Image (tube, coloured by chain):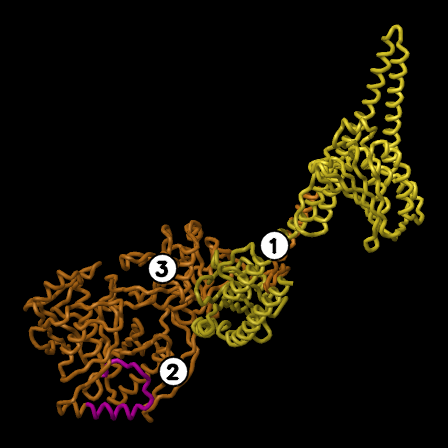
Chain colours: A yellow, B orange
Amino acid sequence: MAFSLIQLVGENLFTQRVRDDQRIAETLSEQIGDPLVALDIDALLALARGVADENGARVLVLDPYGVVQADTRSELSGTRLSNREVERVLSGSAESDYGFYDAGGSGGFWVRSALSLYENVRSMNGLYAQAISRGGERVGALVYITPVQEIYENLRSIQLQILSWMFVVLAMVLIVSMYIMRAVTRPIGDLSEGIRKMSGGELSARVEVRGHNEFSDLAQAFNSMSERIEALDQARSQFVSSASHELKTPLSTMKILIQTLLYQDPIDPGMAKEFLNDANQEIDRLSRIVSDLLTLVNIDSGGMKLNIENIRLRALLDEQIKRLLPLARENGIEIELEARDEVSVPGDSLKLQQVIYNVIDNAIKYTDRGGVVRVQLSRSGKRAIVRIADTGQGIPEKDLPYIFDRFYRVDKARSRATGGTGLGLSIVQQIVQLHGGKIQADSTLGEGTTFTIDLPIQP
Amino acid sequence: MNRRIRLMALLAAAAMLLTACSGRGGAPQGGSSASLPEPPVAPENQILGDDSASLAREITLYRASEAAMELTAVIRLISPGADGNLTRAALEELFGARAAIEDVEFSSGAATVRLPLDAAAGRSDSDCLLLCCSIANTLLGIDGVEAVNVLSGDRAIDICGLPLGTFTGLNGNIPALYAQLQSERERFAAGGAVLERSACLYFPAYGGQYLLPEVRTVSFPDEDYASALIEALCAGPQTRRCCFSFAPEGIDLLEDAPHTSVTSGGERVLELALSPVLANYLALSGIESWQFYGSLVLTLTSFLPELDAVRVSIGGQAVTECDMGVRLARFPNGEMRRTDFDSCAGSSAWLYFARDDGNLVRLECAVSRAAATSAGSILPAMITLGGSYLPDLRSAFPEGIGPEDLLGVSVAEGVATVNLSGNFYCQCQSLDAHGERSLIYAMVNALTELDGIGAVGFLVEGRQVESLAGSIYLRTPLLPDPGLVRGYAPDA
C-alpha cells in the first residue's frame, strides 16, 4: 500500500510536469516552424532561448532526421538524437511523446530513468518531444527538456523513509514473534525435559516456574506431582525397609530358638516347650504384622470399603472398655469413662471399634501400674470428640510428629515386649481419616498422653 | 526444518519488498518499435570550385530621372558577374552598360565605386548628386553593404564645392538634399561652421596583408580636410577590431600644413610634410611602410575632391618608393596614387577558431575582398590563417589539411554544400568529439555568415558520409550554432 501510494503521488507530480511541458512545447513548436524552414538560426534561437530561459529548461530543435540543429546549450548540436520519444514523433507514430532521463553521467539523454532504490540518478530530466509541422509536412521535432531532479529526490526521500520504517516494523515483528515463540516453546521444552528425566528415574527433576500464566500453572502442577511421587517413593522405600526389618525380627528369633533346640541332645522337654512357646508367640506377632500390613495395603489401595451405619459412640466405648478391662486390671490400671453427651456418628462399626480398642490398648500398655486411663466422649458442634488420656510416661516431643508413621516406635524395646507391631496408630489414623475425621496426640513427658479423635456427626 | 522455512519466508519477503522498491514512481517506461527516418540517399555530386558566386538575389535599383530630380525604384533579380562581384553587377544593371562603371571595390561593408573619369564631366552639381544617390541607394540595399563611396576616376566628387563623403544611408528626396548641401556650403564658406561628413578611413589590419576601411563621421572645422583626416587616422580604428592605428596618438604627424599643388599635367597633388619622428616610430613599431602610406593615400583620395595623388616627405626627404612586401613600389615624382594601393584594400570576414573545450572563437579577420564574399574562399582563408593570425589561437582544422582539400562549394536554396577531399576525411579520423565539433561548426558558422547561406552540408569526394569522426551527423545540412562561440580578447 505504501508503495502504491508513493507511485500514485509520483505519477501525479510527474503528470503535472508533463502537462506543463506539453503546453509550452506545443506553443513553441508552432512558432519555431517558420524559422526552421527558412534556416533562420537567429530567429529560431531567439524563440528557443526565450522559452528556455523563462522556464529554466532546455530546448532542442531537430530536423526531420533527428539531427539537433539548435540546442540552447550548444552541447548536442549536430548529433543525432535517437531517443524513443524522438523516434516515435519523427517516424509519425505519435505527435508527441515524453520520457524521463538521467543526464547526470553523460550529459546526454540516452539513459532512461525511473524512481528506484537501485539507481543513483544524478540529474533526472523530463523530455517532451513535439512534432514541428508546416503545411501538413513534418519538418522536424522540438525537444523540451526540464529538470525534475527535485521531484525525483523528494519521492526518493519519501520512499526511503517508508522503506526504513517498513524494515523497522519488520524487525520488530520478527523480534516479537521470536519472543512469543520462545515464551511458548521454552516452557513446553522444559516440561518435556522434566518428564523425560522423571521417566528415566530422576524423581528429583523439577521445571523452572516463570511468570504467571497457564504454562507456569502447568509447571507448578508438574512440580507438585513430582514432589508427591518422590515423597511416595521415599515412603515406599522406607516402608519396605521397615516392613522387611519387622518381618525379619520374629523370623530371626524363631530361627535361633529352633536352632537351639536342634543342637540340644538330648532335648530338654522343659526348654523345648518354652522355646516352642516363644516361637509360637513370634509366629503370632508375625501374623499380626502381616495382618496389619494387609490392612494398610487395603486402605492404601482403596480396597477398604466402609459399612456405614449410625453408631452410638457411648455404647461402642463401653463395649471396648469391657473388652480391655481384664487387661487393665492385670496391669493394675483403672479405666474411667466419662460420656457427657449421647453422640451418634455415621461409620463402620467394626473399624471404629478397632480404632477405639487400639488407642485404649496402647494407653494401657504404656501406663505404669496404678495409672488411670480416662475415656471422654463429648460433642462439639457437629463433631464428636473422643479423648483417651493416660497417666503414662508420655511421648517425647521430638517423637510426637512421627507416632502415626508406620513402624515408628518411641520405645522400641517396650513396644516389642508388649507385642506391638508399630502399625497400630498408623491404621487408626487411616481409619479415622476414612471416616472424615482426624486424630491427634498431645503429650507431656512423665505426665501422660492424650489422643483426641474428632469424627463428624453427619457425613 | 523450521529454520529453513523461516529463512525462505524472510527471503521471499525481502524479494517482494525490493521488487516493490523498483517501482517506476511515475516514470513511464517502455520499448520503442519506431526508428528515425533516414535522409534520402543523394547521388554522387562531385562539386568542384565555387558556384556560390552565381547565386541570384533580388536587388532594388534606384534609377535616376534627371528631369524630375528623383529616383525610381525597380526590383530586379541579379546574379553576380563572373568575378562574383554582386555590387558591380547591380550597378551594371542600373546603368545598363558595363562601360558606365570602371570598378567597384567592396571591402568590409564599404563599396567604393569608380566611375569613368568623365562621368561627372559636364554634369551639374545636382545631376552629379542624383547620380551618386542612385548608385548609393542601389548598393546600400544589398545585404552587407553599409557605406558607398563614389569616385570619378580616382577622384572624389564634390558637390557645391564641398566633399561629398561616404553615403551611409538611403536618400530619397534629392532636391532637399541638394538644398541642404547648398546651405552647408554657404555656412561653411562664411566660416565658423563645422562640416561633418562620413569618411572611409583605411587602417592596417592584423595579419599584415590588408588595409581595411572604417566608415566614420569626421568633423572638418575648415577646408584643411587632410589634416582632419590624418588626425582621425592617428586616433586609430574605433569599430574595426581587427585593425590598428599606424601612429601613436598625440604625435604631431605633420610638420607643415598640407597643401595642394597642381602639376604641369594638371593633376592635383597633396603635399604632406611629415615629422622625422615618424620614421623612427615605423621602424620600431614594426608597422610596414606600405601600410602607413596606403592608409594615408586611400583615405585621402577617397575623400578629398579632385585629388589625384599624394606626395609625402619625411623630414624633408621625399618618399619615392615603398617596400610592398612582395614587390617594391616606385612613385614617380613621389606621387602616390590610389591605384598604387588598390590591391592592399582587403575586406573583413568573421572567421572561427578552435578552443580546447570544443567551443569556438569568432574573430573579424582581414581577408582578400574575394574571400570575404565567397563561400569557396572563406574556408581556405580560415585554413591559411589558422593559428598564425594570432599566436594564441588554434586552427579548427587538423594538421595535414590544406586549402586544396576543400574541393568545392555549391550553394542552393540557402544551403551551402562543401565537398571535402579524401585526405580531409582521413585527417579527421583521429579527432575527438570536441575537435570534430569545433571543425564542423567553424566551417558551418563561417559559411553561414555569408549572405544567402543558412545551412551547410558536407560531402566527401562527392559522396555523403555519416560523420567525419563519429560525433556529428553529416548526412543532413547543419544550421550554425552561435552558442558555441566564446569570448576572446583580440587585444591580447
Callout 3–callout 1 Cβ contact below 8 Å:
no
Between disc 2 and disc 1, the foreground one is 1
Judge if badges 3 and 1 mark residues of a common chain: no
Q: Label 1 is found on which chain of the structure?
A: A
Residue A172 image position (x, y, % from top left): 61, 54
Residue that badge 3 annotates? B380
Label 2 and label 1: CA atoms lie apart by 92 Å
Between disc 3 and disc 1, the foreground one is 1
In-front residue for pair A303/A335: A335
User: Looking at the image, which residue is at 78% across and 37% down?
Assistant: A404
Count neighbours of disc 3 (C-alpha within 10 A) and say few if under 14, some if 14 to 19, many if 20 or more.
some
Q: Which mark is first along the chain, 3 or 2?
A: 2
Residue that badge 1 annotates? A172
Q: Where the C terminus of chain B falls, by quadrant?
A: bottom left
Residues drawn in magenta: B164-184
Q: What residue type is labelled 1?
A: Met
- Element at badge 2? strand
Residue that badge 2 annotates? B61
Q: Is residue B173 magenta?
A: yes
Residue B382 image position (x, y, % from top left): 34, 60
B408 vs A388, left or right, is left
Residue furthest out toward the top: A265
Determine the image quadrant of residue A253: top right
In-front residue for pair A90/B16: B16
User: Looking at the image, which residue is at 70% across and 44% down?
Assistant: B2
User: Looking at the image, which residue is at 40% across and 66% down?
Assistant: B483
Label 3 and label 1: CA atoms lie apart by 78 Å
Label 2 and label 3: CA atoms lie apart by 33 Å
Q: Is residue A227 visible?
A: yes
- Element at badge 3? helix
Q: Is residue A196 visible?
A: no
